[in-house]
Amino acid sequence: MASSQHLATLFFGLELLSMPLYGMLAYAFHERRSLEAGIKYLILSAAATAFLLFGMALLYAQSGRLDLPGLTAGLANNADVWALAGAGMMLVGLGFKLSIVPFHLWAPDVYEGGPGPAAIFLASASKVAAFVVLLRLVMTTPAFQGEWLNETLTVLALLTMIIGNLLALTQSDLKRLLAYSSIAHFGYLMVALVVSNDLAVETAGVYLLTYVVTVLAAFGIVTLISSPYGGADASALHHYRGLFWRRPYLTAVLTVSMLSLAGIPSTAGFIGKFYIIALGVDAQRWWLVGGIILGSAIGLYYYLRVMVTLFLTEAGMQRRDAPHNWGMRAGGVVVLGLALLMVALGLYPGPMVEWVKLLAATRIG
């Protein structure tokens, strides 16, 4: 999907990505919320696919081509209102996959209801692929480069980063909180879509890499703590109260993940946040820079709330723990490695930046 050069290949890639997710989210079908998550994602994803296909049809009607180079050439001097409508409808379809406001309402319910591993895949691989596709379309296709679309993306970015953070403030469920946090982070990433130059490609690459490492660790902790138990995942915040006194190293991993999501220095998230703010400043998009700063300030509150919960005295309510030997299991080794990687990338990001520059040098189109 991310490397497709043809709209038909893009569609097949999108469906091959989405269809397994329907089953993965509803895999724990004996749990009502898991089944509900799978059905919600199925119905809303089908609606988004309809928008995407109709948008592709309108672009094909104007250019007569479905391959991206041909689409670019065909629309170079023929980007009329129907081509703009097609671009808008494709933006709606991909905006759903990225849970951009106002297409975000499915995300918290699906993240909360789906099993941890399915939520991990949805929050990382699925969103990264969709964002890369949208970035390539914005950078290479004339229908996506009009002033109207730029202004639309600016408004959507501001709404996404602010609303995502505000809705996360009141969450008492860690998976729902991470869902709203994911919405806000892709609001920040939309700055790269608005600017859409060579530096934007590099910025998007760095931000996506740091985001994926961080979100894998955060959801990995939820999965580790949920695995020894039947029923729904251990996602309520009270399950994590006093975790430090029982599993201090596991608490350290989750703390580093929250710090990275907040963009605190010496973590991977700081490098991504620095890049995205620098991109906005370089392009003089002051409204977007202000939105990033305001959203980050709001986000700092609920990330700190999660961290404080980990160190509180244990409550009398039900608690859940990872097994005593969690660090010797495959999942434990992975989350420990991700925690070390978050710190390493925050302290020494040079190799990551050079690798991303190498990819960006080939041009995303």
Image (cartoon, rainbow, N blue to C red):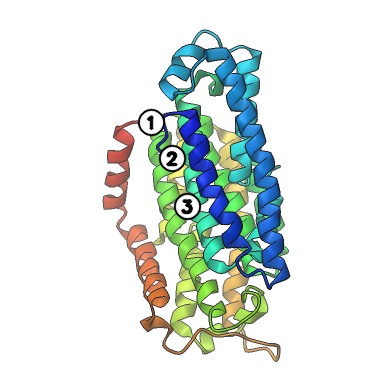
Task: Read off the residue under disc 2.
Answer: 2
Hey, what amino acid is under mark 1? Asp
Labelled pair 2, 3 in contact (Cβ < 8 Å): no
Q: List x then y, in percent, for residue 17.
A: 51, 48
Hey, what amino acid is under mark 2? Ala
Which circle, 1 or 2, is nearer the viewer?
2
Q: List x then y, in percent, for residue 176.
A: 66, 63
Q: List x then y, in percent, for residue 137.
A: 49, 29
Q: Measure the alpha-carbon separation of dots 1 and 2.
A: 18 Å
Occupied quadrant, residue 253: bottom left
Give residue 198's mark.
1
Q: Is residue 28 or residue 242 the one in the foreground?
A: 28
Labelled pair 3, 1 in contact (Cβ < 8 Å): no
Q: List x then y, in percent, for residue 45.
A: 65, 45
Query: For the residue labelled by badge 2, is the local secondary structure a helix, a strand or a loop?
Result: loop
In the rendered view of the protein, which quadrant contains the C terminus? top left
Task: Read off the residue under disc 3.
Answer: 125
At horizontal 60% and vertical 50% (from top left) the residue drawn is 184
Query: For the residue labelled by badge 3, is the local secondary structure a helix, a strand or a loop?
Result: helix
Crowding at dot 3, Cα within 10 Å, few <14 / some 14-19 / many 20+, comes out as few
